[in-house]
Amino acid sequence: MYKCLSLLGFSALLSLQACQSIQLLPVYSIAADKETAPDFSVFKKLLKNNRVVMLGEFCHGAKEINQLRKSFIQYLHEDLGYELLLFESGIGEGISIEFERKELSATQMVTAGVTGPWHTEDYVEIMQYIKVNPDLHVAGFDVQRTGRSFDRWVQKALPTITPNPETYQQVETLYTEMLRLFRNRKVKADEGLEGKYAHLSKLYRDLANLLVENETAVKNKFGEKVAALMIRTLSNRQAYLDYFMDFKRSNDYRARWTARDSLMANNALWLINNLYPDKKIIIHAHNFHISKYNEKELTMGEILAEQLGEELYAIGVFGGKGAYANNGRKSEEMSLTKAKHDIQQIVLGAPHEISIFPIPDTPKAELNWLFEPILVNHSFINLENDRELIPVKAFDAVVGIKGISPPKYIN
């Protein structure tokens, strides 16, 4: 029989509601007993040929998923040699996490670099681990900005690249104002907005050109990787302005989401193949972004799967019951249906607090649910608010955590 791998520290033979009776292999429990070391050794087989591992989440605000991520990152780094960690956070903001880790506290690394919903105590612990492990490199891959730390790098670079730094000193402040206008639904694509967009786009193009023209001086001052990341970030700023201005003109949400995931995929591939070509990589992001297939939308995971093939391994993560925090940090209770094909019923029917279900190449009687449409509530799947996906098309494994709760925020 195909083994359903449980993440608890003992084995048993039990039945699942959604699966028939199956053999259970102990892997790891995220129980509160911190004296028990996590055991992820099963991944030595599961990830034997995978250079890139993507770990998802059904929302951005679950304490237990954050804690699982921290332990999993540590295992992948220490035991399997993964040395590059990519966050679903701004590519420019990730510069500070990687290159200011000695100067910044772990809390400052969180607020400088990662997206707002991850400003939690759990992420402070992740940054504490990063601080003391310089061989674990970090970067963001999102085209969206997730902080204000990139402005520091712009200000430090200006005297090196132009005799007129005052021309560009407010560029990130202007970007903040533009983001506010873009996200205001009452603001239309009128002549005023078009003018602000054209002006700011030109500033970023000119600034990027100055960095390229003075790349040697920038490399001498900051190092080769920082110079490359700064140029890439300025390109991302222009790309974001372009696709959001297009969105204001057309109100085409599908084009907007396609542009974002395409740019994130391109950033990730650039980091993987150009900046860190010799590293094994961990990517963590929302389940939507890491999904290798989506019937309605183009996802980052689908693009990466086409480019990386068998090197890529995607793990979708889901919860059973409890509450989580939405992106606005508001607590939302997890309602439960009675449908047997509900992922929550399967997670709650598992005999352990946290279970991983590796997806086999061919269907097995006890794991048919991985090959059939399954109900996934409390998570973004596509713009049409569908609630069903087929796990085998989207992921290589599914992780279920029975109890979910909101994280504790640091600001």
Image: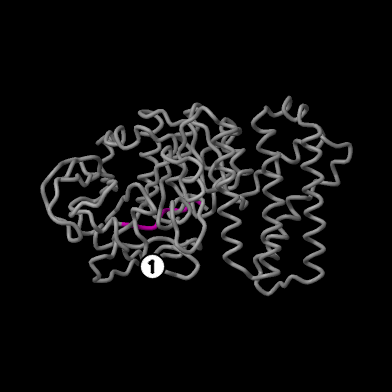
User: Residue drawn at (79%, 50%), measured in percent from left and top?
Assistant: 170
The rendered magenta stretch, by its main secondary structure, is classed as loop
| Most foreground residue, 82 or 95 | 82
Q: Is residue 15 left or right of residue 268?
A: left
Nearest the camera: 188 or 8?
A: 188
Q: Is residue 285 left or right of residue 265?
A: left
Residue 21's place in the image compared with 251, above or below, is: above
State which quadrant residue 36 falls in. Answer: top left
Q: Residue at x 27, y 33 (%)?
A: 41
At 40% from the left and 48% from the top, the residue drawn is 66
Q: Is 41 above or below relative to 65?
A: above
In the rendered structure, which segment of residues is drawn in magenta? Answer: 404-410
Determine the residue located farthest toward the right in the rendered image: 163
Residue that carries the numbered disc 1 in the rendered image: 387
Within-10-Å neighbours for mark 1: few <14, some 14–19, many 20+:
some
x and y percentages locating residue 95 in the rendered image = 61, 38
The N terminus, quarter of image: top left
Residue 25: in magenta span: no
